[in-house]
Image (cartoon, rainbow, N blue to C red):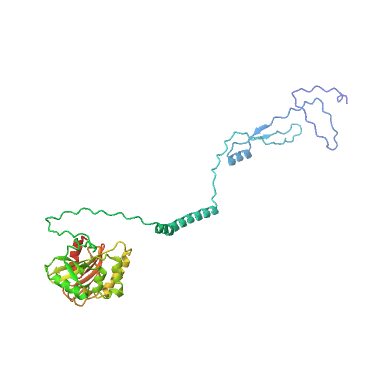
Amino acid sequence: MDELNQPSSPIPNNIPPTPLRPSGFAGQAPQTQTNIVPPPPAADAVQIRTMESDMRSVSGGVEPAPQFVTPPSPITGQPQPITQAPTPSNNPVPPAPMPAVTEVKPSRLIISLGIFLIIIGVAWITYAYLLPFYYAMTPAAEPTPEVAAPEASTEGMGVIPPPAQTQTPVGITPLGGTQSTLPKVDTDGSFASIMTALTTEAKKNPVAGTIQEISITNGGVPMNFDAFMGALLPEAQTNGLAGIFTAAFDPIFSAYIYYDEHGAWPGYIAKENPASQIDAVTLANRIQAFETSSYENLFLADPGIGDTFKTGQARGKYVDRFIPLATQGALFNYGIFGNYLIINTSNNGLVKALDALKL
């Protein structure tokens, strides 16, 4: 017992203190600890990389974020609470703003389209109705008088100059002369008189391979084209030919006689009137009435029975209609050649007329 009451020897400072036994164990009373070295101060928070921080770094594309972990307390043995360290700021550059996109609403498109259609409609109405009305209400300007150019001298060339202008129209014929310089075939305008005058003229120059242009007159005045054709083709007044002759062609026309070894073959040329406003398709359809008319009256003699009308081509560019006839050398054809309607009674005569017209 005396040993127990002996004073305790001092404890070296280098010996770690014995931790206190926690109170509360059954059968043990709390003991008083002497010479206890104060516990060391709590360790500073240590930044530790953990697997979780590395995984976040890989998935998020940022540098690993260290975690602040407090080591276990040397007194209680319990771990200290873990606090998340603030993420260091590296002053990242904010992303560039996306360009603004303007959304076009369907209603705006519909309004724009409606305005465009209204503008087109106004322009069309102005062109189709208002301008013609304006021009119709505007008085026509006075025509500028034409100054005739001086005529070239024909002295010594054997050409008879045309007479002075009179009230009788003098037409320029398609083959190059004037009505006043051509041989005149004067008639009274009837079918019999025309045939007699043409037959008499044909006997004056029977040279094979030549063509002679003539002027057909009635009482000394050139006959109009529609009146001449109406005398030879009585059906022209009912099948529409007379109307198309008047509307589509100049009244002054040209006639010719072609000679070959088989006889004399007349032909007739009318120039289109540029003011007629008749399109080519309509004109071609209307003149087909020749095929149901008495075209035999255009010959100087009976040409015989014909076959059927066929479509041909002249000079590789002109379309005509023709029908071969029983008499040798006789062939009736008609067509639009350039600006001329040519009505012909022989194939070779058409070739000579196209040469003279330079077609």
Query: Quick one: 128 or 216, which is closer to the camera?
Result: 216
Residue 248: quarter of image: bottom left
Horizontal side, residue 135 vs residue 221: left or right = right
Q: Note whether 112 is above or below 300 in the view shown.
A: above
Q: Is residue 306 above or below residue 140?
A: below
Q: Residue furthest right?
A: 1
Q: For the N terminus, which image quadrant?
A: top right
> In the image, 89: left or right of 270?
right
Compared with residue 76, is residue 261 higher up or lower down, i.e. above or below? below
Picture quarter with the C terminus:
bottom left
Q: Nearer the viewer, residue 320 or 219?
A: 219
In screen coordinates, is 253 left or right of 69?
A: left
Q: Quadrant of residue 300?
A: bottom left
Q: Is residue 58 above or below residue 181?
A: above
Q: Position of residue 214 (x, y in %)?
A: 18, 66
| Residue 334 appears in view | yes
Q: Position of residue 296 (x, y in %)?
A: 21, 75
Q: Quadrant of residue 329?
A: bottom left
Residue 310 appears in view? no
Could you tell me which residue is drawn at 67 percent across and 32 percent down?
46
Query: Where is residue 111 shown, x and y percent of the image?
Result: 53, 54
